[in-house]
Amino acid sequence: MKKYGVNELRKMFLEFFESKGHLALKSFSLIPQNDKSLLLINSGMAPMKPYFTGAEIPPRKRVTTCQKCIRTGDIENVGKTARHGTFFEMLGNFSFGDYFKKEAIRWSWEFLTEVVGLDPDRLYPSIYLDDEEAFEIWNKEIGIAPERIFRFGKEDNFWEHGAGPCGPCSEIYYDRGEKYGCKKPGCTVGCDCDRYIEIWNNVFTQFENDGEGHYTELEQKNIDTGMGLERLATVVQEVDSIFDVDTNCALRNRVCELAGVEYLKDEKTDVSIRLITDHVKSSTFMISDGIMPTNEGRGYVLRRLIRRAARHGRLLGIDGKFMAKLSATVIEGSKDGYPELEEKKDFIFNVLNNEENQFNKTIDQGLRILADLEEKMEKAGTKVLTGEEAFKLYDTYGFPLDLTKEILEEKGRQVDEEGFQKAMEIQRKQAREAREVSNYMGADATVYDEIDPSVTTEFVGYEHLAFESEITVLTTEKEIVSSLMEGQRGTVFVKKTPFYATMGGQEGDTGLISTANGVFQVEETIKLRGGKYGHVGHMVSGMLSVQDVVRLEVNVQGRRDTEKNHSATHLLQKALKVVLGAHVEQKGSLVTPDRLRFDFAHFQAMTPEEMEKVEKLVNQEIQEALPVRTDIMDIEEAKKTGAMALFGEKYDEEVRVVSMGEFSKELCGGTHVSNTSQILLFKLVSESGIAAGVRRIEALTGNGVMEYYKNLESLLNQAAKAAKTSTGELSDKIFHMQNEIKALHSENESLKSKMAQDSLGDVMNQVTEVKGVKLLAVKLENVDVNGLRDLGDQLKEKLEEGVVVLITVNSGKVNLLAMATDGAMKQGAHAGNLIKVAAAIVGGGGGGRPNMAQAGGKSPEKVEEALQKIPEILESQLR
């Protein structure tokens, strides 16, 4: 048997199924589309859900893919064994109501034995115990002896996911030989050891589960298969694990090279090598699909993977940042199947470097916090760090539990791991409860799910802003209806529409749909599965019915203003790349008639100079009056022209390329001006950070800029009027007013200080002694916090050595201040602890350092009681 590489096997699989009439689709993004049930795509079938349920018509009834997948359910075991990983590629062939069991089984056998060349005597099929049809095919048609066909129960060989399509499975196992076995008598297919490995799973989707265990036959039966590419490569290349197949082995060896270690020499080192190998691969693929490290959702999964890898890099003693170097090896090994890795290489490296820098700071911060916690444990006389504190270190500061354990174990201490897991479970429960309820498709169930999937809409809005077409479907917010009446809210679907639906960051059109009998106000236009455009709004008058021919009129001014803003975002993106660097990537945008918002990847705030340069460059290209041209071309051809594609977006084979002179070229389905001069003006209003490594620009164009300056002028006139001067003299007037305010403030502070002195009078005769330490505890009236501090400093100076406590009542609130000199502190006095106890008496709280502390309270009637207690509190502190 030839030992094919991972890239060869992927190509062989896809070409084999293409020869069987399948359409080979590129891998979908790791970010699920319209599916709230998943954070990340975790199987080859996940992106196919709409085709299986009939919600969307597939591009062909037979489809084959190699899908990149991430699973993090076993993340804690990654590295500890050679079995577990978070990233894998899933080979799959799918039939949507076309072929069924006979072809699926025959082709899986043909591919494994005739194309790849696996020994048929080492392959063993399994079936669901009641699936006689599958048994007959394996036995009679393929020729497998009955004793070599294994029957398993529902847990192993029946695929279902709550309510929805489901069915029996037939798996194919490969016998890797005795050296991988457990040596126990009776070890056979289904044993937990590594000898018999499942490589292919055929799912026969033939039933519908109503969610209560009742099954009905599906009219359209489907085939869904899955085979782990790395697992197949393990068998074909005759290696021990997924970490030894050619692409992963190259990455693993690079880890060893950077760390100066050898694999399979030390178990602890091996754990780190495997973990880094897996996590860097996952991180590279996630970033290539536009996922950024954040503190929630899929961004948190990425951040966790990067930080775990960075942490194990430290354990292996790798100097400095290393993940981008490893990522280069991932890209080199996988770019054949995933060219987007090479395209986004620089960006991937930037994100990894930035996150590693952040993590190094986190580690140092965590070490400081852990040191404080250890001091607390020392004082409390305990050797166990509470689970809550360990979880806070992990959750808030990103400090890994194993690092906390390791540091504490070195000093004979430990972590309450049970408490940590309880805190973790509380957080998981909250996350589960926060998830939105979704249907089988992982999307909110709506009335639109009931619409026949063959209903579709043709968009004619590039050429027309008014058009006549026939109504195909009408819905209220709850049901499909034949008519909409005056006052009703609903959605109108037509065969052809000039209305642009919200997508690609561009807000959908508004306008009117009318006949002689009724008028419908379109408030928003949405795009639904299967290319349906929904015109959402309300009936203004009369009635509309299905099959009516209606006139659709777009709000022309709204569309024109939106086009100005959309075209300006293209100029803005190119200007940002010119000014900030090629690493700038679009992370999202919003284009409305009023404004534009543009989110982009960049790792620090823009300087005022950079903002000015960007604004100037965009306006320069507007003044150049660049022609805006749209070309429709093949996706590969478009990429060759250098057209910028949106990160993580899945494009059709044919795409629209929007060019603005030679300055900007982007893949875009939106609507645009025909010449940049129509934008008139561009004004950058604000720049801010919205997530780690993501910045946001808000800007205006055309009339919006005019309106902006008109409002600014109005504000300036109001300010000049309030300052009793002209706009030209305003800055001088403000300068003089500020000086005047400063002088009055200084005079006011002097008067307040004098009043505080007068309120205090001569109090030095109230000094007492507690265990040889002087104490001055005094009540004052109507002195503010600043005045209290000034008086405290003066009295401490007069006292020379000792403790000063001042309590004042101001507007019904109590303020307390305590100060202790060096001599008093040496004898045990602690201002922070003293004030904490005193504040509790007056119904408040506070604290501070040993030499100075402040507090507040809300019970003025308890001030005398607090004053009387102060000597007693101080006495308890003194040695």
Image (spheres, helix red, strand yellow):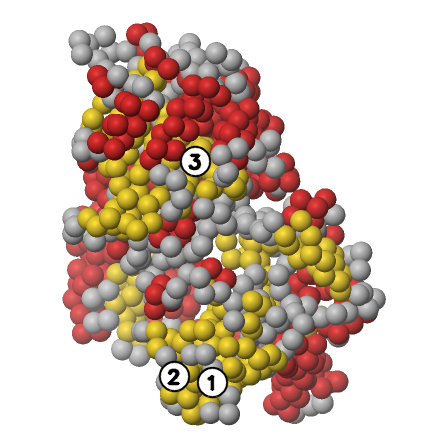
Tell whether 224 sits left or right of 130: right
**At numbered mark 2, what does the secondary structure look like: helix, strand or loop?**
strand
Marks 3 and 2, how far apart at CA: 45 Å
Q: Earlier in the sequence, mark 3 or mark 1?
A: 3
36 shown above or below 403: below
- The quadrant of the rendering that contains the C terminus is top left
Question: Quadrant of the rendered structure where residue 183 is?
Answer: top left
Tell whether 495 sits left or right of 629: left
According to the picture, the residue beneath numbered tag 2 turns out to be: 484
Farthest front residue?
140
Q: Find residue 69 and report its horizontal and vertical position in percent.
A: 43, 38
Q: Find residue 836 and report its horizontal and vertical position in percent.
A: 25, 56
**At numbered mark 3, what does the secondary structure look like: helix, strand or loop?**
strand
According to the picture, the residue beneath numbered tag 1 turns out to be: 520
Q: Earlier in the sequence, mark 1 or mark 2?
A: 2
Looking at this view, is 761 or 792 the one in front? 792
Say what amino acid the circle numbered 1 marks: Phe
Disc 1 to disc 2: CB gap under 8 Å: yes
Q: Which mark is residue 92?
A: 3
